[in-house]
Amino acid sequence: APMQHFPTVYAAFRANAEKFPANVCVQTPQGPLTYRELAQQVDRLAAFLQQRLHLKKGAAVIVLADNHPLWLLVALAVQAVGSVEFPLSPLAGSREIASLVKSTRCRHFFTADAAGTRHIRALLASAHCIQLSGVPPAHKNITALETILRGTQAVAFHHEGSAVSAVIRTSGTTGTPKQVPVLHASFLHSMRVIPRVLRMGPRDVVLSCLPSWHLYARLVEYTALACGAQIV
């Protein structure tokens, strides 16, 4: 189906995972993940978020990570349950993070590694953190992503579409930094147009080097998903 007919980037990804199941989607430190394998991991994480952490449609999820091969997995899983991602640099100050937590009532975090997890540890008395790589600090509210992917079955979960894909803090290069909501419709339009203009296809390889909190990082990787290309 054309991209504009999908409600979310996640829904478009699922369709292409069925169309290009054996294509390599993304390179990770553990090796390549095909579209089929990434879809399975997305569904496991989404099931954990919805059924174990009771993440609701429209709820805020703060992701503290720079360029990380698994942020795409996180973004798609958060979209799958209808929540809204708030990506931040792991170098964000404690006041900035605390202010965002207060304004969004966020109770769910993702961090790239143990250093990022320790950075927000003071906030975890009433929140849960999932660490993407490495051994997490011992804490009842911290879970390693690897543990979730190993121990959660890819059972069916209720896909909750949301109009907003992510809220990104940006200055627009020269302006005052502010939180800007980005709609799924905006990404889906780019996913429809850019591959056609650049003549991209399932044999292409896309280099993603920007941090996950940068709008263009998302645009590049979602565009690759639209045509079954590989992301490195």
Image (cartoon, rainbow, N blue to C red):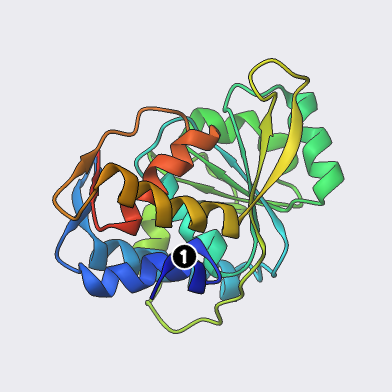
Q: Residue at x 78, y 20 (%)?
A: 176
The answer to whether residue 177 is above or below residue 76 is above
Q: Quadrant of the N terminus?
A: bottom left
Residue carrying label 1: 10
Image location of residue 151, percent across then percent down: 37, 69
Left or right of 171, for residue 145: left
* Residue 144 visible (yes or no): no
The answer to whether residue 34 is above or below residue 135 is below
The answer to whether residue 60 is above or below residue 156 is above
What amino acid type is highlighted by mark number 1? Tyr
User: Which one is in front, 192 or 126?
Assistant: 192
Left or right of 87, for residue 21: left
User: Which one is in front, 147 or 49?
Assistant: 49
User: Which one is in front, 211 or 131?
Assistant: 211
* Residue 217 visible (yes or no): yes
Dot 1 alpha-carbon crowd within 10 angstroms: few under 14, some 14 to 19, many 20 or more: many
